Image (cartoon, rainbow, N blue to C red):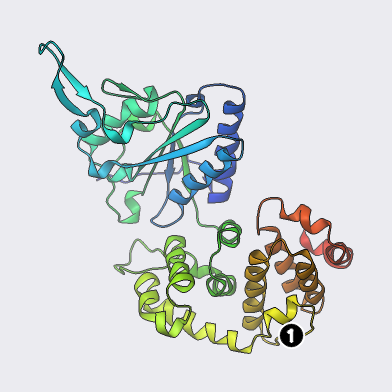
Amino acid sequence: MSEIKLSDVPSMSVEKAVDKLSKAYCAVIKKGLPVKTVPSVMLWGPPGVGKSQAVRQIAKEIEGIGKRVAVTDMRLLLFNPIDLRGIPTASADKKLAVWLKPQILDMDEGEDVVNILFLDEITAAPQSVQAAAYQITLDRVVGEHRLPENCIVIAAGNRTTDKSVAYRMPKALSNRLMHIEIEGSFTSWKKWAISSGINEKVLGFLSFRQNYLMCFDAASNDLAFATPRAWEMVSNILNHVDDDINEAYPLIAGLVGTGVAVEFRTWAKVYNELPSIEDIFDGKNPPVPKNTDAMYALVSSMTVYAREHRNDMNRIANSIRYSGGIPADFSVVLIKDYMYIEKGYKEKLMRVPEFAKWLQQKGSLLNGSV
């Protein structure tokens, strides 16, 4: 295997990649142009950085313009070249072989539908299978089968430097793709995490220790390590299995590694020092924590509570009023996080008098975020 060099490839966060690609796809769809007007895309990046999540977010953005989006996840590593062509069978006159289309390529061609064919782990596929992807990426053809005009093609894979299974991409294939390297970004991840329901303890801990969002090290032999994907799985355990970190600790350690899990468990003890979040949103004025790590926990807890009660603007107003009594830097973080709750939520906040008052007092600290 030869090293895949990405020195001439643009690098961007998941958020920026989603924004750029979504705008491109939506533009051609609104103009009635074939989606293949936008070249097939190749997303590069280390394991767990968010490449698959980016594809799901792109689908969500396209749905925002009134289309139904169907994502077909094709792991090329699991296919042989012949699998992509289908199964041969005799023609009606028994003189020729015809190929039955693989079910995975049987897509809805309706005008209200956009298909996304996601060729995940393409670099892990042997070159014989990558060669079979030539027609897919450029001509939208697989053997005798043509992809529908409403089909977007996005590929993703790891670099050989990531110590994952990765073969050098043939030049003929790479020249058919628009290459983007996905980089880890805490700010980008946090915006997604708040709107997606990531557990408050995960949000608070990673706000406190941002460097623990992505601990992938290609030189390490560790099996469990922290990545955005691993933290999402930790969040699922805390949200749906057991929210007691002491009880869930063995599972958490199996996802992010023992060292990070120990720090996470130790830090989470600060939640015992927090005032009642219910009291804050009820308009009461409980004491503000004194230490820094507890403030991170408070902000994450208020954000998650606000997300769950996003339409109760009276309670949101009470929390904004309370934020006036916490240190200014944390107050700014809280308000920024509120803006990530859902698309357009900033406009809802603008109609809240307490928010307008907060802007008058601290709005200049947002650095143009409003």
> In this image, 245 relative to 196: left or right?
left
Q: Which residue is drawn at 42% across and 32% down?
A: 177
| Quadrant of image for the N terminus | top left
Q: Is residue 193 visible to us here?
A: yes
Say above or below: 189 vs 73.
Answer: below
Looking at numbered disc 1 in the image, what kind of residue is underneath it? Answer: Val
Q: Position of residue 315 (x, y in %)?
A: 76, 70
Q: What SS does tag 1 mark?
A: loop
Residue 92, quarter of the rendered image: top left
> In this image, 299 relative to 223: left or right?
right
Residue 310, quarter of the rendered image: bottom right
| Quadrant of image for the C terminus | bottom right
> In this image, 125 relative to 35: left or right?
left
Q: Where is residue 123 in the image (x, y as percent from the top left)?
A: 31, 43
Give 192 or 155, whichever is nearer the viewer: 192
Give 100 or 140, whichever is nearer the viewer: 100
Q: Residue at x 55, y 38 (%)?
A: 21
> In this image, 23 relative to 226: left or right?
right
Say above or below: 49 vs 279.
Answer: above
Q: Which residue is drawn at 51% across and 28% down?
A: 38
Dot 1 crowding, Cα within 10 Å, few <14, some 14–19, many 20+: some
Give 117 or 366, whichever is nearer the viewer: 117
Q: Which residue does the numbered mark 1 point to in the structure image?
A: 288
